[in-house]
Amino acid sequence: MSTDMLPIFLERIFYPNQVVRALPNYDKNGDKFSNSTSLSRSIDVIKSEENKFALKLDIQLDLEKSLNPAYEIQLTAVGVFKVNDQSLSDTEMKRFVFDSGTTVLIGALRERIAMLTHSGPWGVFNINIIQIPPISLEEVLRVSPPQTEETGEKTINTTKKVAVKKKATRKRKAVRK
């Protein structure tokens, strides 16, 4: 099946922030299921290609609300999605990426947390079911500035920037020398 036939295509997932720390006060005979997580998300337009979006999802274990946390957890996943349905408006595409992409990234974060904790002193930690908050139109329309070809920087949110290096840029520099 060609990826052009799918309404949305996941190009890649990466994890720019991964913090997992074992907590010494964890009671292995205590409550294992009353952990509270917080979730935040943002979306960016990738200017270099039409209908391409980067969805960022942050997950954090809320230590204040959790009864017996085994680990301190802060992870960020970024998924790069391409929307192939040309009949959708920009706003509809963003909403589509928010809805579908959030579910994909929560699953990826769940697996990543299990992988990072499996060799920890308290064993595998699985995050509980996360209720995805409904998306508002304001959240969809709040988009960070697009990636610029010249600088190679892409704004993930207003506080962090991730440098994006491209092979083509490196090749052009090598040819100029």
Image (tube, rainbow, N blue to C red):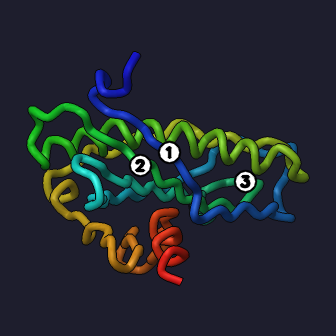
Q: Which residue is mark 3?
A: 68
Alpha carbon separation for disc pair 2 and 1: 5 Å
Residue at x-position 41% and y-position 80%: 159
Residues marked 3 and 2 touching at CB (< 8 Å): no
Image: 175 above or below 131:
below
Alpha carbon separation for disc pair 3 and 1: 34 Å
Q: Which callout, 3 or 1, points to the residue nearer the camera?
A: 1
Q: Secondary structure at mark 2?
A: strand
Residue at x-position 14% and y-position 41%: 92
Outermost residue to the bottom:
177
Image: 23 above or below 136:
below
Task: Check disc 1: other Cα within 10 Å, few if <14, some if 14-19, many if 20+.
Answer: few
Is residue 154 shown to the viewer in this render?
yes
Q: Which residue is mark 2?
A: 80
Which amino acid type is marked by label 3? Asn
Residues marked 2 and 1 touching at CB (< 8 Å): yes
Q: Where's residue 83, x and y in %?
A: 26, 38
Q: Which residue is mark 1?
A: 12
Q: Which mark is residue 177?
A: none
Q: Tell me which numbered mark, 3 or 2, is placed earlier along the sequence.
A: 3
Horizontal arrangement in the rendering, residue 152 relative to residue 147 (left or right): right
Is residue 162 shown to the viewer in this render?
no
Horizontal arrangement in the rendering, residue 79 relative to residue 47 (left or right): right
Between 54 and 51, the one nearer to me in the picture: 51
Quadrant of the rendered image containing residue 93: top left
Task: Check disc 3: other Cα within 10 Å, few if <14, some if 14-19, many if 20+.
Answer: many
Q: Where's residue 27, x and y in %?
A: 85, 52
Q: Secondary structure at mark 3?
A: loop
Q: Tell me which numbered mark, 3 or 1, is placed earlier along the sequence.
A: 1
Which amino acid type is marked by label 1? Arg
Which amino acid type is marked by label 2? Val
